[in-house]
Amino acid sequence: MTETKLEFMGEKLADFYHPIAHIVEQCQWFMDCPDAQRGMMGGFMTAVLNNDFTGAVCNADDENIKHLRTIAIFLYSKGNCVKKKFNSLIK
């Protein structure tokens, strides 16, 4: 059985990102949602997108805490559009 290729914004992502597929899918949903609001991302992702390291660590579940580096790499290299949309919304 082969794994489904992970995509974000129409781009196929490397297998490196498979451990954070749930984060990639959440970011894709956020980008696709025309009525998106800041609170829709949850406490962990809100902290991540606010560059709040302490908040991210305190809100991370067991899986996310293990993959903070991969999440940061994804947002830096692929997810700048998520950060821009998130920061453009009214606080």
Image (spheres, helix red, strand yellow):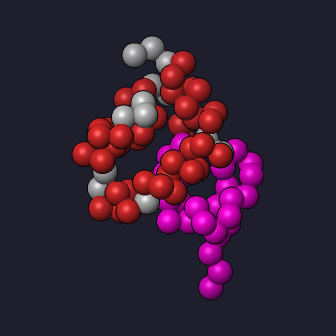
Q: In the image, 74: left or right of 51?
A: right
Q: Quadrant of the N terminus?
A: bottom right
Q: In this orientation, which residue lies closer to the viewer: 25 or 81?
A: 81
Q: In the image, 63: left or right of 87?
A: left
The structure residue drawn at horizontal position 45% and vertical position 25%, both measured from the top left corner, is 37
Q: Position of residue 11 (x, y in %)?
A: 74, 52
Q: Position of residue 66 (x, y in %)?
A: 38, 62
Q: Magenta segment range?
A: 1-28
Above or below for 63 versus 2: above
Q: In this orientation, which residue lies closer to the viewer: 76 or 89?
A: 76
Q: Quadrant of the C terminus?
A: top left
Q: Using the rendered view, name the quadrant where residue 81 is placed.
A: top right
The structure residue drawn at horizontal position 65% and vertical position 80%, both measured from the top left corner, is 2
Q: Is residue 42 magenta?
A: no
Above or below for 10 versus 5: above
| Residue projecting furthest to the bottom | 1
| Residue projecting furthest to the right | 11
The structure residue drawn at horizontal position 65% and vertical position 46%, both measured from the top left corner, is 77
Q: Position of residue 28 (x, y in %)?
A: 59, 44
Above or below for 85 versus 43: above
Above or below for 86 versus 9: above
Q: In this orientation, which residue lies closer to the viewer: 79 or 31?
A: 79
Q: Is residue 26 magenta?
A: yes
Q: Is residue 40 visible?
A: no
Q: In the image, 59: left or right of 82?
A: left
Q: In the image, 56: left or right of 79?
A: left
Q: Position of residue 29 (x, y in %)?
A: 55, 42
The structure residue drawn at horizontal position 45% and vertical position 14%, both measured from the top left corner, is 90
